Image (spheres, helix red, strand yellow):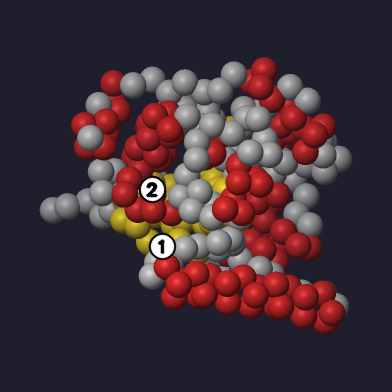
C-alpha cells in the first residue's frame, strides 16, 4: 500500500495547513522580533549535543518550519549557509533580514542548481503539524534536495510513548501522530536509509545541582524503559519526543 502511495506522490500537490490556524501563534509561543534568531544557552548546548560530530562549515542547511530561528542562529554560528521555510509570514520577513534564503512551504521554488545540493535538512517539532499524505509528499521532495549521503533530522512527539500525548494534544495545529517505527517503514518506500532514532539530547551544563537533577531524571526514564522492555518483551521509547535521522541513499551506478 505504501509503495502505491509513494509511486503516485509526483502527481500530488502538497496542501499546507492554512495560515489562519496560526493566528496569534507567535504570541502564544512567545516569539517575536526581539527574540528572533537568538539561541539561548540551553538551546546552544542542546544543538551542540544533538549534532556533536557534525561539521556545519560551508554546508547548505535547510530548516523546515524554522519558527523563531533558534536552530538557524546556531547553524549560522557554526558556518552554515541557511535556507528555510515557515508558515507565519512575519517570521519569514524576520528571517530574510538575517540573510536566510526563505523558500515556499512545499519547496517548489528551490532553484534547480540547488536541487541535490543540501547537506542537512532539519525539522524540529514540525512534521506533526502536517497531514500524513502531505508529509509523504514533503519527504519525497526533501530526498530530491539532499545530496547523496545528506541527512534529514526530525523531532516530533513520540507516538510510541504515552507521555507523547501531552505534546501531541497540546497544540490544535497538530495533524499527524508519528513514531520512529513509522519513519523506519517510510524509508522502505522513499529514497532514504533509516539511520536511527533516539530520545532528544539532554544537555548538561550550569550548576552541579541542576546537572545532578537532569542525570537523575534521565537515569529514571531509562530504568523504566528497561523494566517495560523486560516485562513486555518489547523495547518502547518513553521520551515524550523522539529524534529520527534519515540518510539520502547514494545514487546507483
Q: Residue at x 83, y 82 (%)?
A: 208
Secondary structure type for disc 1: strand
In the rendered view, tell whether residue 37 sits above or below residue 27: below
In the rendered view, tell whether residue 51 sits above or below residue 230: above
The reply, left or right, for residue 56 in relation to residue 148 is: right
Residue 220 is situated, as x and y percent measured from the top left of the image, at 65, 75
Instruction: Identify the residue under disc 2.
Output: 182
Secondary structure type for disc 2: helix
Depth check: 50 or 149 in front? 50
Residue 27 is situated, as x and y percent measured from the top left of the image, at 82, 32
The reply, left or right, for residue 13 in relation to residue 253 is: right
Depth check: 224 or 67 in front? 224
Residue 120 in sight from this viewpoint: no
Closer mark to the observer between disc 2 and disc 1: 2
Depth check: 71 or 42 in front? 42
Instruction: Identify the residue under disc 1.
Output: 196
Amino acid at each position: 500500500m505504501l509503495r502505491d502511495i509513494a509511486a503516485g506522490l509526483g502527481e500530488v500537490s502538497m496542501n499546507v495547513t492554512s495560515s489562519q490556524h496560526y493566528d496569534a501563534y507567535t504570541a502564544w509561543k512567545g516569539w517575536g522580533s526581539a527574540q528572533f534568531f537568538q539561541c539561548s544557552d540551553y538551546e546552544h548546548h542542546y544543538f551542540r549535543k544533538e549534532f556533536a560530530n557534525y561539521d556545519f562549515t560551508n554546508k547548505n542547511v535547510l530548516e523546515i518550519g524554522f519558527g523563531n530561528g533558534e536552530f538557524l542562529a546556531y547553524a549560522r554560528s557554526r558556518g552554515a549557509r541557511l535556507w528555510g521555510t515557515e508558515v507565519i509570514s512575519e517570521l519569514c520577513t524576520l528571517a530574510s533580514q538575517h540573510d536566510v534564503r526563505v523558500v515556499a512551504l512545499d519547496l517548489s521554488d528551490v532553484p534547480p542548481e540547488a536541487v541535490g545540493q543540501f547537506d542537512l535538512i532539519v525539522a524540529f517539532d514540525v512534521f506533526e503539524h502536517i497531514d500524513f499524505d502531505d508529509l509523504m509528499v514533503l519527504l519525497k521532495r526533501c530526498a530530491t534536495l539532499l545530496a547523496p549521503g545528506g541527512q534529514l533530522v526530525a523531532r516530533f512527539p513520540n507516538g510510541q510513548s504515552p507521555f507523547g500525548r501531552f505534546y501531541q494534544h497540546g497544540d490544535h495545529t497538530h495533524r499527524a501522530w508519528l513514531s520512529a517505527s513509522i519513519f523506519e517503514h517510510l524509508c522502505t518506500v522513499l529514497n532514504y536509509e533509516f539511520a536511527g532514532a533516539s530520545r532528544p539530547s539532554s544537555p548538561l551544563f550550569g550548576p552541579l545541582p541542576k546537572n545532578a537533577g537532569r542525570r537523575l531524571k534521565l537515569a529514571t526514564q531509562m530504568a523504566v524503559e528497561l523494566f517495560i522492555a523486560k516485562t513486555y518483551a518489547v523495547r518502547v521509547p518513553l521520551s515524550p519526543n523522539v529524534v529520527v535521522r534519515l540518510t539520502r541513499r547514494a545514487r546507483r551506478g
